[in-house]
Amino acid sequence: MARVKIDIPEQLGFNTQIPVTISYINYGSHVGNDAILSLMHEARFRFLASLGYKELDKELNVGVIMADVAVIYKGEGFHGDVFDIAVGAGDITSFGFDIYYRITTVRDGNNIIIAEAKSGMIYFDYNARKVARLPEEWKEKLK
């Protein structure tokens, strides 16, 4: 079976910490795969905010929309962990960009990689309901 591969840059440039709450835990007593996507969403929101952006500009009704996502699970996360989520952008085009994520935690003095991921983001005009050109200002800040 072919495995998903993601070439994540070594340095991502933005970090945020998110505690693992009980709502992220599944029947296997660890963080669920759906929770990882929610954590990525929160980290992406914080990353874009650090650049002065939101996922949706309500006045213009344009923003970013996820076109694809890939996640590679590498370790288990548990209630009480604090996830450090490193985030960075790459593969910037006229219409979108990729966001990379590395989720780690420190447990018993060991740095543990929980997951690595990539989401493809497209700039989207919600009025026209179609892809729009990524503003030059976004391209410069994402670099």
Image (cartoon, rainbow, N blue to C red):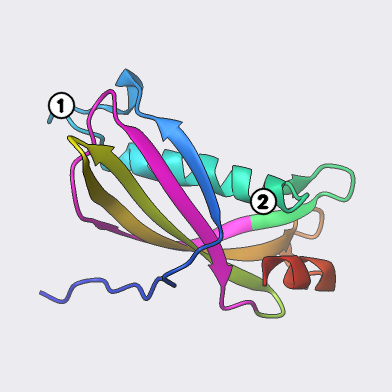
Q: In the rendered structure, find residue 72 and report the number of the disc placed on it.
A: none
Residue 90: x and y, percent? 56, 73
Image-quadrant location for residue 64 = bottom right
The residue sitting at 28% across, 74% down in the picture is 5
SS type, badge 1: loop
Instruction: Say above or below: 121 vs 17.
Output: below
For residue 48, which numbered disc appears in the image?
A: 2
Mark 2 and mark 1 lie on one chain; the one further toward the N terminus is: 1
Q: Which mark is residue 27?
A: 1
Q: Is residue 110 above or below residue 143?
A: above
Dominant secondary-structure state across the stretch colored magenta: strand
Q: Is residue 74 left or right of residue 42?
A: left
Identify the magenta region: 65-92
2 relative to 7 in the view: left or right:
left
> Which residue is the extreme one toward the top?
22
From this viewpoint, which residue is outermost toward the front? 109
Q: Residue at x 41, y 70 (%)?
A: 10
